[in-house]
Image: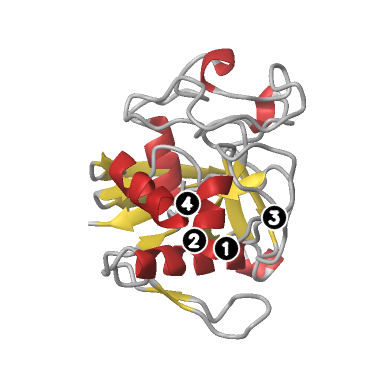
Amino acid sequence: MSPESLVRQAIAEGMRGIPAGEIVLRDEGTQTNWNVEVAAFRLAPYPVTRELYRAVRGEAPASSAGPRTPVTEVSWKEAVRFCNLLSQATGLEPCYSIGDDPDGQDVICDWEVDGYRLPSEAEWEYACRAGTSGARYGELDEIAWYRGNSGGEVHDVATRAPNAWGLHDMIGNVWEWCWDVYDPRVYGPYRVFRGGGGYDRPRGCRASCRRKSHPTFRIDDLGFRLARSL
């Protein structure tokens, strides 16, 4: 399939409409909670795949994983660049202005335009929960690839049960970059990622679990998912 066909296929598969609502986020380290209102938005039904990433960027990080597995070894800065490139390729207005700061602190997101972007942390957890309030939106073995069933591998997207809003792999398979800075007072430019991965124990595969790293960080169980504002 040509790169243009892959991009058209990704568009045809569509994004899920997420209704407006409210979410309570919690940081377990500081034992603090905060409420966030979430406007209606759209979210991809699964993480960006290796084949889509290659179609847009011309190449993907080296891996023995298959084309329908989530792309990994992608930094936060590379993820926002991908969002802009996909927006341009599909005739949408890019969300991000990107400078030269190695820490990514000069990246600005225009939340009003129609291009592709990373979800905010609040959007991510709100969509992950899909109206549920427990640790997960279903039984772990049914919804997620994690240490107990993954065989130490990343698996094809959408091969576990979705949540009530039609979203696959929100828990397990790969962690997913979000837009937000984790805690600038303590960790500087570190960005949030969510969701747990195929190498994680059950404790890491919960809707509320937060992790972070530098925006240039790359690892083999960290990818990203696309969002769009309405």
Q: Is residue 178 visible?
A: no
Query: What's the mark number on residue 58?
Result: 1
On screen, residue 93 versus residue 177, left or right, reads left
Label 2 and label 4: CA atoms lie apart by: 25 Å
Q: Which residue occupies 67% across, 33% down? A: 154
Q: Are marks 4 and 1 in contact (CB under 8 Å)?
A: no
Q: Which residue is mark 4?
A: 121
Q: Secondary structure at mark 2?
A: helix
Label 2 and label 1: CA atoms lie apart by: 6 Å
Q: Which residue occupies 45% across, 63% down? A: 83
Q: Are marks 3 and 1 in contact (CB under 8 Å)?
A: no
Of tags 4 and 3, the one toward the viewer is 3
Of tags 3 and 1, the one toward the viewer is 1
Q: Amino acid at mark 4?
A: Glu
Label 4 and label 3: CA atoms lie apart by: 25 Å
Q: Are marks 4 and 3 in contact (CB under 8 Å)?
A: no
Q: Which residue is mark 3?
A: 61
Q: Relative to 128, is 30 above or below?
A: below
Of the residues under marks 2 and 4, which one precedes in the sequence? 2
Of tags 4 and 1, the one toward the viewer is 1
Label 3 and label 2: CA atoms lie apart by: 13 Å
Q: Secondary structure at mark 4?
A: helix
Q: Amino acid at mark 1?
A: Gly
Q: Position of residue 45 (x, y in %)?
A: 39, 37
Q: Kindly give the residue lying farthest to the bottom in the view shown.
A: 100
